[in-house]
Image: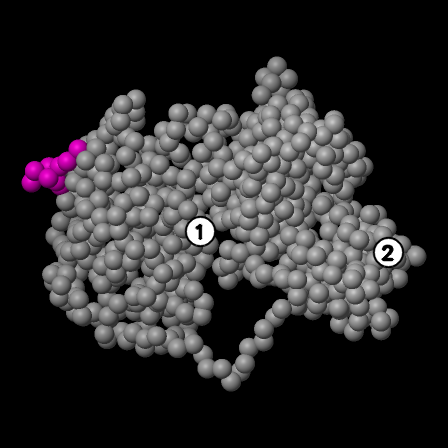
Amino acid sequence: MTIAPPRPRAGHAAQVVGFRTGNEMAALSAKQIDFHLMGYYPITPSTEIAELLDEMKAAGEHDIVMVPADGEHGAAGICYGAATGGGRVFNATSSQGLLYSLEQLPVQSGTRYPMLLDLATRAVSGPLNIRGDHSDVYYALNTGWLIFMARDPQAVYDLNLIALRVAERADVRLPAIMAFDGFFTSHQKRRVSSFADDATVQDWLGPVPETVTALDPRHPVTIGAYMNDPDLINNKYQLERAMDAAAAALPEVFAEYAALSGRRYDPVDLYRMDDAEVAVFLLNSAAETAKDVADRLRTEGVRAGVVSPNVIRPFPAAAIRAALRGVRAVVLGERSCSYGAHGANLSHEVKSALQDDPENRTLCLSRVYGLGGRDFYAEDAEAFFRLALAAAERGAVEVPFDYYGVEPGDPATPRPHRGAPPLTREEMTTGLLQVQPGPNGRLEVEAPPYWQLAAKPKRLLPGHGACPGCGVFPALDQFLRGIEGDVVVLYQTGCAMVVTTGYPYTSHRISYVHNLFQNGAAALSGLVEMFHERVRRGELPAGEDITFVMVTGDGGMDIGMGAAIGAALRNHGMIVVEYDNQGYMNTGSQLSYSTPLGHLTSTSHVGPAELGKAFHHKDTPQIMAATNIPYVFTGVEGYPDDILAKAAKAQWYAKHQGTAYGKLLISCPLNWKTEDRAGVEIVQAAVDSCFFPLYEIERGVTHITYDPEPIGRRVPVADWLKLMGKTKHLGRPGDDETLALIEAEVERRWQRLKAKDEHPLL
């Protein structure tokens, strides 16, 4: 949204005024910088940055190469590799995404390749929480990256430009993080200004500085060499000197940007600190709330001020010492904690800075607040000021460190009602499903019609928060009805996890464990082996028998593929079930590697310069089959008897031979852009078009379990695609090529599958 431009100021570049969020300003600044490449992976609340940039690219507004990674670790590697090529590189992430890429960060700073990483800060799991605090950015304090902090959408835009300018200086050459509060800043709109012409930004930044690059064959180089003592300590000393150079350069760059834009920044934002007797030290958006309270307290005769760094790496120790020299007491409020250290990281750094000043007598109180995105209101800021006032009046600090805003539980409060009693092994063992090896090497399943199992209790209760028409839970219910006896489930992060476990309630009547996208299969394999070892040691009841099932989806077999393959190669006795909704739906329908070619998602837009996802979908069942696990299968909700039989086989193989893997195609009406009730029809068409064939691979041998061709039910792929709003553009004039590529790939995979079905060894 654009508002009338402001009056031009003498000496300042032309600007326009708008009403935008922090994420929008991050994307706008990236577009105007014109980075060479962005490597990215979706994670709330930073995902919108990549979505907006992809939308702009589809419209032909920039030429940044957008590379969707298999996970944040991969995204960080993509960015590092690109940076060694000598161009400008951008990324955006949050929370666990930063932690997953963490080991890559010191590699980039240690080899001195600049880039820019926007961090929409978010609580670090576990338990899982997607709201904004600073527990992620604190993990980056020791990585050797510059770290800028933006308190509002305007600062997001400005500090992106400033951070890159500092990072690329010849005496600095370090990567930079620009952090802003998830949801508080990333999604809240504010009045902002931006340069009217992209060239203004690019001219101010100048050309990409020349550096050592891997793309000059006439001058070969070795990047990231192995270092012995004393070379490594010298390398780290140089990095420290680069931080010193950045600290020295900041005032100059801030002044240059002020001359260009009319907006002045300093290493530390000081508000009414000239004569302050009490102060609060806060990062980012909370500082803005405290400023209003400081104004009000001033009317009461309280000389209150606010200290808020714009940069925390390099740490502005001298500026903080100077700001607090005349302050009697300060509350150091932080949205993170260094557990067991009696204060969060920056509290200790502020105290250390003050200790180096012999003239300083400021009393410091450290308080952790706002974890998990808890709001920080004016009343909270006033409480901080009152704490400082009380300490100043006493001349001493009674409680140096504490949490603020904790609500203690009441031991007399009863535990949350379970909602349903635990399931017994007897009621989950019907005896109606019989599995035994057949003479041809395949298992033979004797199963009743699906309706006969209707009385079997649900392991997953209704009442969860899934979208109307979501196909996850009908398909999982069908699958779990084919499993006899006790079950323990592990869910990776995703829609199915989020909508069934909102604390303090759960939809699960069986034991449930959650682990992150990238490591679910590893976690479940550890649980499986612990179970067997405790049984062997006699620590669990004799005869205890549990089936272990991992439920994954929403891209979990992208970022979690390595752990899944590792578990499969080790061949643990467990079942991996993937619900395939063709995207990262839990974060807002971004493309995943299961998204088919040409499909519209929020990171594969359709426009003059882009026609949906640019590459074919991953054939996960075939990948898992290549690990030589004993059983692989596919299924859909519309064939419940087929799912029952395959579930029973998967359980048998998990009990007797090792890992089983199954992929269930499920509908996602919200993100497929269809009616809620259309799911069964769409997945049926996917099967009848042979896009999603039903088959199983037992001990390496393939068997098609449903062939639409002999019974005259084969339909063109186009008939399936036209049922979904996300593919309505395919086949229209000017886009016949994409449809032809999809049809050719579907046919190629189908013919290969038929060939395997006909071969006794494949």
Q: Main secondary structure of the magenta part?
A: loop
Residue nearer the viewer, 15 or 690: 15
| Element type where label 1 sits in the image | helix
170 displayed left or right of 704: right
Q: Extreme left residue here?
A: 711
- Residue at (78, 62) in percent of width and height: 299
x, y percent for residue 250: 77, 37
| The residue stretch that appears in magenta | 707-716
- Residue at (46, 82) in percent of width and height: 414
Lower position in the chain sequence, tag 2 or tag 1:
2
Where residue 532 sits, quadrant-wise, is bottom left
Residue nearer the viewer, 600 or 216: 600
x, y percent for residue 206: 67, 23
Q: Nearer the viewer, mark 2 or mark 1?
A: 2
The residue indicated by pointer 2 is: 275
- Residue at (65, 42) in percent of width and height: 155
x, y percent for residue 459: 29, 67
| Element type where label 2 sits in the image | loop
Q: Which mark is residue 517?
A: 1
Amino acid type, callout 1: Phe
Amino acid type, callout 2: Asp
Report if residue 280 is visible in the image: no
Report if residue 252 is visible in the image: yes
